[in-house]
Amino acid sequence: MTRKQSRIPDTVIKVRGLKNSFGDQVIHENLDLDVCRGEVLGVVGGSGTGKSVLMRSIIGLQQPDAGKIRVFNHNMLGEMEEEEALEEGSEAQDVRKRWGVLFQGGALFSTLTVAENVQVPLREFYPDFTPRLLDELARYKINLVGLPPESASKYPSELSGGMKKRAGLARALAMDPDLLFLDEPTAGLDPIGAAKFDELTRNLQETLGFTVFLITHDLDTLHAICDRVAVLADKHVIATGTIDELIQLDHEWITEYFTGPRGRAALGAKDRVSGQAARNDSAAKAMDSAPDGEA
């Protein structure tokens, strides 16, 4: 159940029996996963567990060996030929219009400006949009992610790491998606930059209401914005739940990850932030209830 839902949510992504392999190396075997509408789902796992491979399978960049994937109740595997899937107005195209992706590092085109990068999906799906409309939409998305207006004309090489992430996010949001994929969005950012990006993601999700599929190693991110966390280990999703629920499970990797030194530090930081917020709220209420002249 997410922060904003009071009923059993419907499923935006449903994965069943997924198998992925590279040669003789099996990455996923009989993997199942549900992502609910309106939630922020964090996906964690050790190196080599195939977190990015899972995302790429869902969005059609990796062809699984077996299994079923449905996004917005549309079968993403083997339902039609590639040519038909790319045909304008097809159901597959309509589904792809409803998601946005932020790849690791932003994955911006180095020869395009920030504004031109943001316009890429718009040009692909709406070739009849005028240059003026494209420019206006790009400026709006750039402002939405907190970048200054002058960044629109800059090239990726002129941006800091944090600005590249925000530019990539602006492009991912270009189509007003119902579903947002984020692959290690805070990797390479300093703690302050990572916290600001988490806050931006949470505020946008709560305002716009999209569903988030978030791959991360960042424990602070999990505590800050995730409604549930799916744990990849032993070639499949071994558990899905809130952090409090996962901590109760008897699994070596989960225990080490969430209750080890870094896990305890992240939990302590969350508690300090929650405590400060509670104190600020109490102080505000006291000020509001004080008689005139005593505040």
Image (cartoon, rainbow, N blue to C red):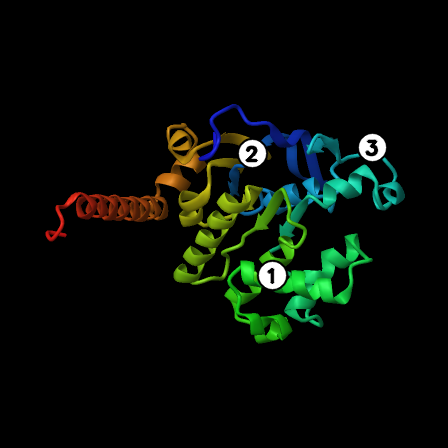
Looking at the image, is mark 3 or mark 2 nearer the viewer? 3
Depth order, front residue of 109/151? 151
**Left or right of residue 191: residue 27:** right
Which residue, given by chain and number where applicable, does mark 1 sit on?
A: 140
Q: Earlier in the sequence, mark 1 or mark 2?
A: 1
Q: Residues within 10 Å of mark 2 (few under 14, many from 20)?
A: some
Depth order, front residue of 294/106? 294
For mark 3, give the secondary structure. loop
Which residue, given by chain and number where applicable, does mark 2 sit on?
A: 234
**Left or right of residue 45: residue 137:** right
Can you see residue 269?
Answer: yes
Amino acid, disc 2: Asp
Seen at 58% across and 34% down, the residue is 37
Instruction: Place residue 31 in its image quadrant.
Output: top right
Amino acid, disc 3: Glu
**Left or right of residue 224: residue 145:** right
Q: Residue furthest top?
A: 8
